[in-house]
Image (cartoon, rainbow, N blue to C red):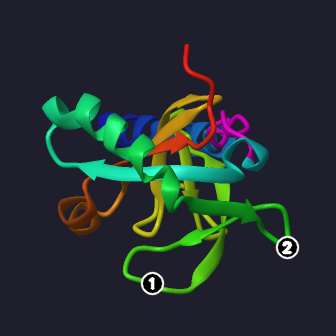
Amino acid sequence: MAYAFRTAALALGGLAAALIAGCATEPPPPPVVAAPAVSADQLVGKWGFAAYHRDADRARTIKEALAQCNKPYVISKGPTGGVMMNLADQAELTELVLKAGPDGKTYLGPPGDAGTADDRIISNVDANSFTSTYVDPDNTARYGTSVYERCGQKKA
């Protein structure tokens, strides 16, 4: 009987310790998200635009994008600080915002969380060009990787 009592007391003590330990732990902090690596002002302007589906076509596509400057894709500043661009499959311009993702990538899309289906990942950014790919695989399959080359850039 004493053995059973001692075993029950130890079990109860272990359970109490586990409960207390569970109460003492805090949930993990949310991930730290830095500011986007690109500003809306960097995207405003006139751009030659072209797209490719195979990485081997990138160099040729950059030249094609520059050739489109005779009818540029215009990115203007949005009314609340974003940029006015088209969403996939949308004819009307929509204000899109730049968002930093917890993965360190810069996203461009409607206001809200970074990395949603309507977003694009912005990469290869410099003063005269940037590249974007859609997060949604169906949009990427249709539209490929987009290359934007600033019109009127000085040749190096």
Q: In the picture shown, does residue 77 fall above or below 64?
A: below
Quarter of the picture containing the C terminus is top right
Q: CA distance from mark 1 to mark 2?
A: 19 Å
Residue visible at 40% across and 67% down? 117
Magenta span includes 22: no
Residue visible at 60% across and 79% down? 93
Q: Position of residue 43 (x, y in %)?
A: 67, 47
Which residue extends farthest right? 80
Q: Residues within 10 Å of mark 1 (few under 14, many from 20)?
A: few
Which residue extends farthest front? 70
Q: Which residue occupies the foreground of this view, 21 or 60? A: 60
Residue marked by disc 2:
79
Secondary element type, mark 1? loop
Amino acid type shown at disc 2: Pro
Q: Which mark is residue 52?
A: none
Amino acid type shown at disc 1: Gln
Q: Position of residue 1 (x, y in %)?
A: 31, 42
Specify whether residue 39 is in view: yes
Q: Quadrant of residue 113?
A: bottom right
The reply to whether the C-beta atoms of the residues labelled 1 and 2 are less than 8 Å apart is no
Q: In the picture shown, does residue 125 fall above or below 148?
A: above
Q: Which residue occupies the foreground of this view, 56 or 35? A: 56
Residue visible at 18% across and 61% down? 141
How many numbered callouts?
2
Q: Position of residue 19 (x, y in %)?
A: 56, 46
Q: Pick whichever of labels 1 and 2 is earlier in the sequence.
A: 2
Q: Main secondary structure of the magenta part?
A: loop
Magenta span includes 30: yes
Residue marked by disc 1:
90
Which residue extends farthest top? 156
Region in magenta: 29-39
Could you tell whether 49 is left or right of 85 in the image?
A: left
